[in-house]
Amino acid sequence: MRRNDSRAARRQGSPFTGLGPVFMKELSDHLSSVRMMVLTLFVLAFGAFPVASSLQTLRTVVDPNSFLFLRIFTLEPEQVGISFIAALNFIIPLMAIGLGFDSVNSEFNRRTLSRVLSQPIYRDALLLGKFLAGLTTFAVALVALWLIVVGAGLLLLGVPPRGVEVARGLGFLVVSVAYGGVWLAIAMLFSVLFRSTATSALCALGLWLFFFLLWPQLASAVVSGVAPSEIRSLEEYAAVQDIAMGLMRFSPGTLFSEAVLGLLSPETRTLGPMLPAQMRGAIMGAPLPFDQSLLMIWPQITGLVAGMVVVFAAAYVIFQREEVRA
């Protein structure tokens, strides 16, 4: 009788019972692991060269109205040939995949998942706690990196950032965390699908390479196949460009690049073909207000958040239907 009563009481509890302990345990494991230290050092080393070269170039700029702190992230120095944002577009997926590729299947392999779920912890809380812990760990590392870049800018440029630059920088952090969340959810999805940690890591890395290297070529091939042989009007050109950009935006990296471009380059007035009125504003060099930049990139931010939610929901549904007994 007592056993049946305890089971009935457990069924009546919240589906997120145990979320806090799972989150704190996974967060502690991430922050104290050797893997996290290696990933953080990799990010710092990979981003140090573009930032150092950008700061050396920007020290010669004397215009106080040129958004110096934002140009630290977007400037492409001749010595390196890559901006800090381009470097982040490369390393954020790697870091997120490194945090999530073995989050679930490692529990299967150690035969600890059934023991954990035998406690008053639901599958909902277990999977959500692991995801939130990984996302928090990623956000902590990214905020630390952002503070290091801003601190280096304060020391070498000698001028403080303006309020609008700080706001745009914080918006950049939010977009970067959402971008990392997409790849963390993808890594966790493969961790749920495959029992082998090597297989889940290879599938996640393969999908990243597909979007990073192959998808732009496939999108160009599709556009070349459907575009007319001769473009005779501005409307036809705009239609072809809309198709090309629509295909490219299936890639999370494209959404991240466009959102960051709109935030950190206030002179950007559109992410598609530029209208004559927008061209006049761009020639005059008038920056967009922060709220207008947010409205321009809102579809990209929504796409990243929606992708993260959809992929995590797929992992959640599959995990709910799996057999976890040893």
Image (spheres, helix red, strand yellow):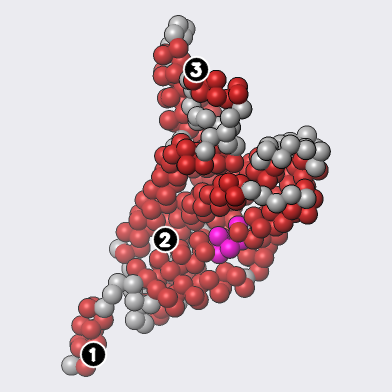
- Residue 204 appearing in the image: no
Q: Earlier in the sequence, mark 3 or mark 2?
A: 2
Q: CA distance from mark 3 to mark 2?
A: 50 Å
Neighbourhood count class around disc 1 (C-alpha, 10 Å): few under 14, some 14–19, many 20 upward: few
User: Which structural element holds mark 1?
Assistant: helix
129, above or below 7, in the image: above
Magenta stretch holds residue 140:
yes
Quarter of the image where the N terminus is located:
bottom left
Along the viewing direction, whichever of 254 and 148 lies nearer the viewer: 148
Q: CA distance from mark 2 to mark 1?
A: 31 Å
User: Which structural element holds mark 3?
Assistant: helix
- Residue 154 appearing in the image: yes
- Side of 161 where 301 appears, left or right: left
Q: Which residue is mark 3?
A: 276
User: Which structural element holds mark 2?
Assistant: helix
Quarter of the image where the C terminus is located:
bottom left
Name the dominant secondary structure of the magenta segment: helix
Percent across and percent down for residue 202 are 54, 52
- Side of 270 where 17 appears, left or right: left
Q: Earlier in the sequence, mark 2 or mark 1?
A: 1
What segment carries the magenta color?
137-142
Residue 118 lies in quadrant: bottom left
157, above or below 278, in the image: below
Q: Which residue is mark 2?
A: 192
Q: Which residue is mark 1?
A: 3
Kindly identify the residue that appears in the image at 34 percent across and 76 percent down. Answer: 17
Q: Nearer the viewer, mark 1 or mark 3?
A: 3
Type of residue at label 2? Answer: Val
Percent across and percent down for residue 236 are 42, 13
Q: Nearer the viewer, mark 3 or mark 2?
A: 3
